[in-house]
């Protein structure tokens, strides 16, 4: 049994002692309103109560994250090296070509985030999904920790406990530089760039990272994919500045949707003119059919006994939603046991949890997406019930005339911690919570600061 719930109760008790700590909540809200924690140019919704994790939780999350990363690298390596294994994956032909572009540096999966439904009572539980270089949330955790650290609640709690936060910036920047140093075509005094389609990007987070790269002595640009120009063996931005390495934040399906506009980056990566960190091989991790692949005999044969047990305990059953791979009658009849989702989208697009729908609606959903009727394959995955914790939102306290009207009652939210790895090393956690069975921004999710309590690492 972890101490997490006890820590949360202790934190909430301090808030009660402070009559809701209205000044602390107001100051946190004011800070977040003017912070860089923007998601698609919208202020991130957040909690005044942090997620408080103990040593046992830290150790478990570290093990889960690093084991997942190690398994991912085995699958990726097998895909790159074994043509027969590649044929088992259902990918667009363009993705196959992108994935096989040589990396020319020594990191298979430079950056990843593993989203987990963790039961904090016994530390059991399985994954929602795995993500590669398109992962975000690091800046939200940083800003949220700043926003609450001056409150009386935080200060009183800190008098009783040793509190640590995760640095999700400097370690990754340093690892990025180390990876670039192994690039076979590296140059002295390189310029880096963070690249995405800016309408889909977490631009303010990119800018914080760009500053961090600069503080480490490396110029770093934030560039829209469509502004890249590749000529005479050099990749440049719209202002003509040469780019030597890219942190790829654009997910692969966005590249497919904007195929022609993406050709300069693809050509530069293919020619080795620019280090693409991470490569398109990260799609193997991002695409949710990897959860099915982990149970194939071809995959299990290359895993250790410990890794196979890990897969059995942590990976939810995941199958293509068609007659060839799953019993559709069983899926229709047991709606609360399943969730339907596309293999390679993000942001909870076209995701349907059976427990959120009537039986009639669920049968309609299955009919709409089964057997490729929607024009693309869909997956059906075992639904895992999230762990719930109590929180107080950072609400617009400053806009309430009478402090007595400010809500002081906690609400219970579902949890989905995302575990970051920087080239295989555990880096920290992105804590998302939501009131609905699907945790996503359109359904009212919140972000909470992550604090390690009395932990050594």
Image (tube, rainbow, N blue to C red):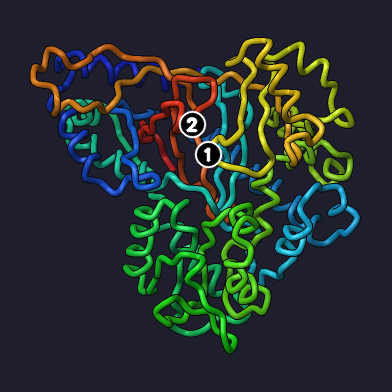
Q: Residue at x 21, y 18 (%)?
A: 15
Give the residue at x 18% y 17%: 406
Q: Position of residue 167 (x, y in %)?
A: 38, 49
Q: Is residue 410 visible?
A: yes
Taking the view exactly as shown, the residue that stands out farthest to the left is 401
Mark yes or no: residue 306 visible: no
Q: Quadrant of residue 46?
A: top left
In this picture, is 436 found above or below 109? above
Q: Secondary structure at mark 2?
A: loop
The label number, if any, that marks residue 454 in the structure image: none
Q: Position of residue 178 (x, y in %)?
A: 51, 68
Vertically, is 406 above or below 448?
A: above
Q: Identify the residue at horizontal 81%, vertical 55% (top origin).
A: 78
Residue position marked by numbered label 1 in the rendering: 347
Q: Is residue 34 above or below residue 153?
A: below
The residue indicated by pointer 2 is 440
The quadrant holding residue 52 is top left
Neighbour class for label 1 at 10 Å: few (<14), some, many (≥20)?
few
């Amino acid at each position: 049994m972890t101490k997490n719930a006890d820590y949360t109760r202790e934190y909430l008790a301090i808030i009660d002692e402070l009559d809701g700590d209205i000044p602390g909540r107001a100051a946190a809200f004011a800070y977040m309103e003017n912070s860089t924690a923007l998601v698609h140019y919208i202020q991130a919704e957040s909690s005044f109560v942090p997620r408080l994790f103990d040593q046992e939780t830290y150790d478990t999350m570290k093990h889960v994250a690093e084991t997942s990363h190690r398994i991912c690298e085995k699958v990726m390596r097998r895909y790159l090296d074994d043509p027969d294994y590649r044929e088992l994956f259902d990918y667009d032909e363009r993705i196959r070509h992108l994935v096989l572009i040589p990396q020319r540096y020594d990191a298979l999966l430079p950056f990843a985030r593993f989203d987990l439904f963790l039961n904090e009572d016994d530390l059991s539980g399985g994954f929602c999904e795995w993500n590669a270089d398109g992962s975000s949330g690091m800046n939200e955790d940083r800003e949220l920790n700043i926003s609450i650290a001056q409150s009386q609640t935080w200060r009183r709690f800190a008098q009783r406990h040793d509190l640590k936060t995760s640095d999700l910036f400097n370690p990754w920047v340093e690892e990025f530089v180390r990876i670039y140093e192994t690039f076979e075509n590296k140059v002295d005094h390189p310029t880096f760039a963070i690249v995405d389609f800016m309408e889909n990007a977490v631009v303010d987070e990119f800018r914080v990272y760009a500053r961090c790269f600069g503080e480490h002595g490396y110029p770093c640009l934030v560039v829209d994919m469509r502004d890249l120009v590749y000529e005479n063996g050099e990749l440049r931005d719209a202002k003509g500045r040469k780019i030597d390495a890219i942190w790829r934040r654009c997910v692969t399906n966005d590249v497919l949707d904007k195929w022609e506009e993406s050709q300069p980056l693809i050509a530069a990566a293919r020619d080795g003119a620019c280090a693409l960190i991470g490569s398109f091989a990260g799609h193997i991790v991002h695409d949710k059919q990897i959860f099915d692949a982990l149970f194939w005999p071809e995959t299990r044969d290359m895993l250790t006994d410990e890794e196979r047990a890990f897969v059995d305990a942590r990976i939810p059953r995941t199958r293509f939603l068609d007659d060839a791979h799953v019993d559709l009658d069983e899926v229709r009849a047991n709606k609360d046991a399943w969730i339907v989702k596309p293999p390679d989208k993000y942001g909870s697009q076209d995701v349907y949890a059976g427990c959120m729908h009537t039986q009639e609606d669920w049968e309609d959903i299955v009919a709409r997406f089964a057997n490729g009727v929607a024009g693309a394959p869909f997956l059906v995955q075992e639904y895992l019930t999230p762990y719930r914790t109590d929180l107080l939102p950072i609400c617009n306290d400053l806009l309430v005339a009478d402090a007595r009207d400010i809500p002081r009652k906690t609400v219970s939210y579902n949890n989905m911690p995302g575990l970051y790895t920087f080239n295989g090393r555990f880096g920290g956690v992105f804590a998302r919570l939501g009131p609905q069975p699907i945790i996503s921004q359109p359904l009212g999710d919140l972000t909470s600061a992550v604090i390690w309590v009395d932990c050594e690492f």
